[in-house]
């Protein structure tokens, strides 16, 4: 189905310096290999391929919940999007202003965007992308990004544990495993540099000895192994828990309600009118939690946040590799050219293994989308063999016993689905007020890595909305939405057909 890929990099956004050498470890970059700029679209309605997470909750009434039969005509704040960002923003809004009304709009089923379709890995990057961020933003910001990911992971785990959230949370050792010598060499350099510059690495156990790495990780061709704590979880169930609590405290959720436009309120009574197919809502505050789809509603974000389909593969391990032989850790398997397998074996749940990330087949999928841009928001893709075949090859040649295992009915690679990643043109999310739109705020552009960002980015946004300083958010300054940043990226996307992504 998919044509062969070609490399599409061109010049970088002003102010953003690209690394001199191919960034072998930059899995997100690989994920974000530039695409035709300016393309965008509203969420696709109808025909979505159901993720494993969504398949598990088909009788949950939250899926098509509407708190009130009629769409409210006014609200203090309208949050657009019911993924993890919109849901946590609504939570923080309630805590900050319990007296204010919050309406959450969702175009489709509750949490059926990237959050409900991802690989379920909350893996704080603790060294791997340091070189990329250092090159682009300097050492201080790069260290802040790493520290923020650790803080975000801890915040997510604390919330789940303190609130007894039923979401299959697993906390344990995640392994980063380079699969060839070149990748291992660059990884080592990056790790050493991070350590040298004062990055926190005392919680990371490292071995550069391939046989030791293979023994620890159980990956036959491992060249090194970096181990630290991370989590996996059922992301829909976590988000649903938060939203149920929000609703019990007064939030109005309206699913299957697409926001089509935002215009100034001509009566002057309110600041903004949010237009939907079910009527209009007057409000003073709008929050864009629309991630990949942000530019469809806010055209100044075209070429700044770009949608891109990614696949997640589900693998039911055959009997021979189950039980005592089941995988007990999550993984980032680092491939040449920045490719990555992100592996979540659901160790505390059913042992079904999720394979996300950007494996070599992603390039073919990217090229196909490039040639068929109408598919840029297509989350109806399923079982894309060009992507699955690389996962199959990897497991067969790397996990003991997986190649020889007899695969019976109901076992093996039975399904994969697509979800839409919101690529940020400079690789980091946008948190803050939309330039030139007082009262409109954004938390989006999570760049395929939102589970390790949103638990601090969403509350951080509400702090900014409340007039608190950026410092109070604890977020890296490079996440801030500013007129200069937006202008810079827009100029770049206008000048060059393609914006390089750091
Ligand atoms: C296949 C895949 C695997 C991934 N794996 C991981 C992973 O393992 N770990 C990780 O950290 N990250 C992963 N990600 C990325 C992560 O899922 C996202 O960064 C994160 O979920 C973004 O959350 P969000 O709430 O900002 O956006 P979303 O969850 O996409 O929510 C946005 C919502 O807004 C709605 N919406 C948009 N426009 C409108 C409109 N105009 N009107 C009404 N509603 C609207 C959408 O329907 C959607 O539900 C993955 C992503 C994909 C696609």
Image (spheres, rainbow, N blue to C red):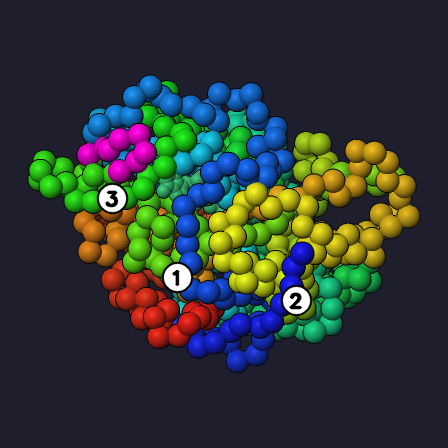
Of the numbered discs 3 and 1, the one sitting upstream in the chain is 1
Residue 177: x and y, percent?
70, 59
**How many circles with numbers are drawn on the protein?**
3
**Mark 3 and mark 1: Cα distance apart in space:** 19 Å
Residue 467 placement, left or right of 432 = left
Q: Residue at x 20, y 56 (%)?
A: 436
User: Does the rendering let one see residue 294?
Assistant: yes
The residue stretch that appears in magenta: 275-282
Residue 308: x and y, percent?
51, 55
Q: Residue at x 65, y 63 (%)?
A: 3
Q: Residue 279 falls in which quadrant of the image?
A: top left
Residue 474: x and y, percent?
36, 51
* Residue, far left: 268
Q: Is residue 178 above or below residue 118?
A: below
Disc 1 residue: CB within 8 Å of ligand 1: no
| Residue topped by disc 2 | 4
**Mark 1 and mark 2: Cα distance apart in space:** 23 Å
Q: Is residue 171 above or below residue 123?
A: above
Label 2: how many Cα within 10 Å (few below 14, some 14–19, many 20+): few
Q: Is residue 485 above or below residue 445?
A: below
Q: Residue 380 falls in which quadrant of the image?
A: top right
Q: Residue at x 83, y 34 (%)?
A: 409
| Residue topped by disc 3 | 262
**Mark 3 and mark 2: Cα distance apart in space:** 40 Å
Q: Is residue 284 above or below residue 212?
A: above
Secondary structure, mark 3, is: strand
Of the numbered discs 1 and 2, the one sitting upstream in the chain is 2
Numbered badge on residue 38 = 1
Indicate yes or no whether the magenta region holds residue 161: no
User: Does the rendering let one see residue 219?
Assistant: no
Residue 473 placement, left or right of 373 = left
């Amino acid at each position: 189905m998919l044509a062969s890929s070609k490399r599409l990099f061109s010049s970088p956004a002003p102010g953003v310096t690209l690394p001199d050498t191919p960034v072998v470890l930059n899995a997100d970059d690989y994920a974000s290999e530039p695409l035709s700029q300016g393309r965008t679209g509203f969420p696709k309605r109808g025909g979505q391929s159901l993720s494993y997470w969504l398949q598990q909750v088909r009788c949950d009434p939250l899926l098509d919940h509407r708190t009130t039969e009629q769409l409210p005509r006014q609200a203090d704040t309208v949050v657009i999007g019911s993924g993890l960002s919109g849901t946590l923003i609504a939570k923080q809004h309630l805590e900050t202003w319990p007296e204010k009304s919050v309406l959450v709009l969702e175009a489709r089923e509750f949490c059926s965007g990237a959050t409900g379709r991802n690989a379920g890995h909350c893996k704080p990057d603790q060294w791997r992308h340091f070189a990329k961020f250092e090159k682009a933003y300097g050492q201080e910001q790069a260290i802040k990004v790493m520290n923020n990911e650790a803080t975000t992971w801890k915040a997510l785990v604390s919330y789940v544990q303190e609130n007894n959230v039923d979401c299959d949370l697993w906390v344990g050792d995640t392994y980063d495993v380079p699969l060839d010598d070149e990748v291992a060499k660059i990884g080592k350099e990056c790790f050493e540099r991070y350590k040298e510059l004062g990055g926190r690495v005392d919680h990371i156990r490292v071995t550069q000895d391939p046989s030791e790495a293979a023994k620890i990780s159980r990956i036959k061709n491992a060249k090194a192994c970096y181990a630290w704590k991370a989590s996996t979880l059922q992301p829909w169930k976590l988000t649903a828990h938060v939203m149920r609590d929000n609703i019990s405290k007064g939030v109005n959720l309206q699913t299957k309600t697409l926001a089509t436009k935002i215009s100034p309120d001509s009566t002057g009574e309110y600041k903004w009118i949010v237009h939907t197919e079910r009527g209009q809502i007057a409000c003073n505050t709008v929050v864009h939690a629309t991630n990949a789809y942000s530019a469809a509603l806010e055209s100044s974000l075209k070429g700044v946040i770009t949608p891109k389909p990614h696949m997640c593969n589900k693998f039911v391990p055959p009997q021979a590799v189950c039980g005592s032989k089941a995988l007990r850790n999550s993984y980032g398997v680092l491939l040449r050219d920045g490719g990555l397998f992100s592996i979540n074996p659901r160790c505390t749940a059913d042992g079904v293994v999720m394979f996300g990330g950007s494996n070599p087949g992603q390039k073919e999928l990217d090229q196909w989308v490039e040639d068929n841009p109408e598919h840029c928001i297509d989350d109806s893709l399923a079982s894309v063999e060009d992507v699955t075949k690389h996962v199959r090859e990897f497991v067969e040649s790397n996990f003991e016993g997986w190649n020889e295992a007899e695969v019976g009915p109901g076992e093996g690679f039975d399904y994969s689905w697509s979800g839409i990643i919101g690529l940020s043109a400079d690789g980091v999310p946008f948190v803050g007020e939309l330039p030139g739109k007082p009262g409109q705020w954004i938390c989006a552009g999570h760049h395929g890595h939102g589970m390790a960002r949103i638990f601090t980015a969403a509350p951080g946004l509400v702090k900014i909305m409340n007039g608190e300083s950026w410092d109070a958010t604890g977020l890296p300054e490079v996440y801030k939405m500013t007129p200069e940043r937006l202008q810079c990226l827009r100029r770049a996307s206008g000048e060059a057909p393609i914006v390089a992504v750091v």
